Image (cartoon, rainbow, N blue to C red):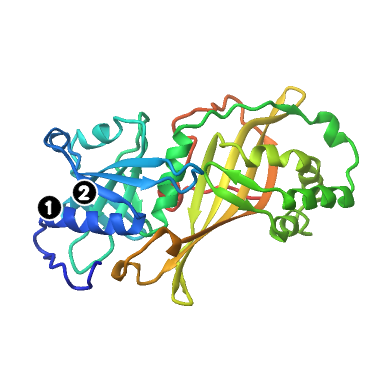
Amino acid sequence: MIASGSTTFSSHKADGAAGERYAAAILTCALCAQAANSTLQEDGKKLDLKISLLNAFSAHKSIVSVHAQIKHGNSYARQSPGRITLQNLGNETVPTLQDGTQPALIIWVPPWPNREIYWHIIRPKGKHRSPIKIAEGDIVTPGLRFELSRFANFERRNPRYPSLDIRQITGEPTSRANAKMNYAKLKKESLSNPLLGNILVTRLAWRHITRFSRTTDRRLRSFHILEYLRVFLEKVPTRYLVDRKPSCEKDGLMLERSEIVFWYANAFHMGQEAQTLLIRFIEEVEYPQNWRERPLSEKDVTHKVTLMSWWFKPQKSGASLFHTDDRITRQQATVGSSVTLP
């Protein structure tokens, strides 16, 4: 249990060891995880903690192992409106954290009395933007477990699927009644995605794709591919974006709400023109508001994902399926990245 006021950080001088202990306590509580100090060899390579947590989206409860580097104090961060820019990390920190197959974390602990700690996920074996910028909303909460699980499962992706020629399909008339019948079948399916867990199909997506503000052509295009949608809903996308909204309080619980967009490159083609399928979801995570002051179990944290909409558009010429920067994660999305939604 983390008691309010039990930590006495100075706002003038940071204590690295105290910051590491505080971060370890908050991380293990938020993630329902176990943490171990680094070995002497790992400590020499700038690794502070090894965190083990259950994969939130694995039916077999596989383990996600995360290395973490803890930075405490103002000397490691520069704060500006809406974001935090890390600095003075050293030349070895990021390359060391990338040396593996699992995601890694850089944690920044600000001076007391700020109780929040901030996170940034490091992708293994990939290019990394410098300097590292953290959105002011990227604080450690129980919702981080789902982000780490999603990141770990994405790194094990193998996004290969047949590209369907929809030139003839889109030329055929499709009635609203037929599309509604296909949607009713989809609602009855038990759907699960490696990056989202179970997916709920409700009236939300149907209302979205049939709204009057959409052009007739867009509505028909969504109708045409509806019967093939399930195949993609259960597969890992070629890239994704997580746009997190500000958290809010609801009946003594904290609610984190995010919009997630999946890209499936080369999902369809019309003659020689490749088409990219995009699917949008709403993710909601609820947990006790006082989670820091009480024992927290996985059952205290609820997670729900709901299908919101889908559409397809011509794929950009020369786009690579495995480009280093194809996937935009939460922290990048909240500091200026955006996606145009129809």
Instruction: Report which quarter residue 92 is drawn in.
Output: top left
Instruction: Report which quarter residue 63 is drawn in.
Output: top left
Q: As shown in the figure, which amino acid type bears the numbered disc 2? A: Ile
Name the spot of residue 231 as percent of width and height, x first.
68, 37
Rendered position, 317 above or below 250: above
Instruction: Report which quarter residue 29 is drawn in.
Output: bottom left
Marks 2/1 in contact by CB < 8 Å: the verdict is yes
Indicate the secondary structure of the residue bearing disc 2: strand
Q: Nearer the viewer, residue 54 or 281?
A: 54
Q: Nearer the viewer, residue 290 or 169?
A: 290
Q: Nearer the viewer, residue 39 or 237?
A: 39
* Residue at 18%, 62% in the rendered image: 111
Q: Residue furthest bottom?
A: 251
Q: Would residue 118 be visible to someone looking at this image?
A: yes
Q: Quadrant of the N terminus?
A: bottom left
Q: As shown in the figure, which amino acid type bears the numbered disc 1? A: Gly
Earlier-in-chain disc, 2 versus 1 = 1
Name the mark on residue 70: 2
Q: Would residue 139 be visible to someone looking at this image?
A: no
Q: Viewed as shown, does residue 316 lie left or right of 165?
A: left
Q: Viewed as shown, does residue 182 lie left or right of 283?
A: right
Residue underneath mark 1: 16
Instruction: Measure the alpha-carbon separation of dots 2 and 1.
Output: 8 Å
* Residue at 87%, 51% in the rendered image: 176
Indicate the secondary structure of the residue bearing disc 1: helix
